[in-house]
Amino acid sequence: MTELDRLTALFSALGADADARDWAESEAEEGLPQLARYRLLRTVWQDVDAWGAAAPQWVDAYRTDGAAADAVDRALAAGLTPEDLGALAREIARETAFAVLYALADPTDGSLPAEVEAQLPGWRLAELTPDGTPTGRHLDALHEDFAELEPKGAVS
């Protein structure tokens, strides 16, 4: 099995489907940490989607023991369904995830004076091997692929 075949199989296992080979080629030929990138974005989308898919469960849980119990009760009393709340929560989660990914790429948001921002540390996500050893490769501009990887058939 070639490295390209191995990577394609891993991308397929993560659900890249028809794009698995393209992602694998990008990693193999360009040396980009595409498998780590795809895995992270897939994980973020799973969490975002859970707000819509599991709405009946979390709505019930929030009603019995949650910081937003009163708000959830008011929304339901006003006629919203758990599915409505799930669609709203999913959209908020999607927007929040995009904002975090964007901030990873550009931590200066203009909310502070430029002379203060210039002195602040930044951050980056680093790829690790399965045993936790840093590879030296970093995941950059994750927000650029975020919308493209939205699960098919997702409720928005």
Image (cartoon, rainbow, N blue to C red):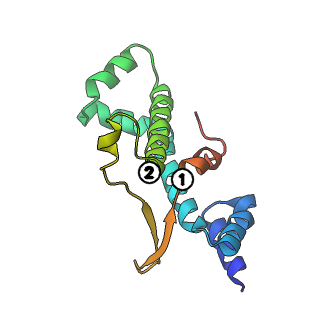
Indicate the position of residue 66 as horizontal and vertical percent values: 26, 35
Give left or right: position of 99 versus 65.
right
**Is residue 125 placed above or below 2 in the rendered structure?**
above
Q: Position of residue 90 (x, y in %)?
A: 48, 36
Give the amino acid type for the residue marked by disc 2 in the picture: Leu
**Residue holding disc 1:** 142
Where on the picture, by quarter, is residue 65?
top left
Residue in the image at 64% along x and 67% along y: 11
Given residues 21 and 156, the one toward you in this image is 21
Nearer-the-camera pick, 1 or 155:
1
Q: Position of residue 88 (x, y in %)?
A: 47, 29
How far apart marks 1 and 2 lie (CA) works out to: 8 Å
- Badge 2: residue crowd in 10 Å (few <14, some 14–19, many ≥20): some
Q: Nearer the viewer, residue 51 or 29?
A: 29
Tally of numbered tags? 2
Query: Which quadrant: the C terminus?
Result: top right
Tell me if label 1 and label 2 are in contact, CB under 8 Å: yes
Q: Secondary structure at mark 1?
A: loop
The quadrant of the rendering that contains the N terminus is bottom right
Q: Quadrant of residue 82?
A: top left
Q: Residue 119 shows which numbered tag?
A: none
Residue at left offset 41%, top offset 79%: 133
**In the image, is residue 108 above or below residue 29?**
above
Q: Find the residue positioned furthest to the front.
A: 115
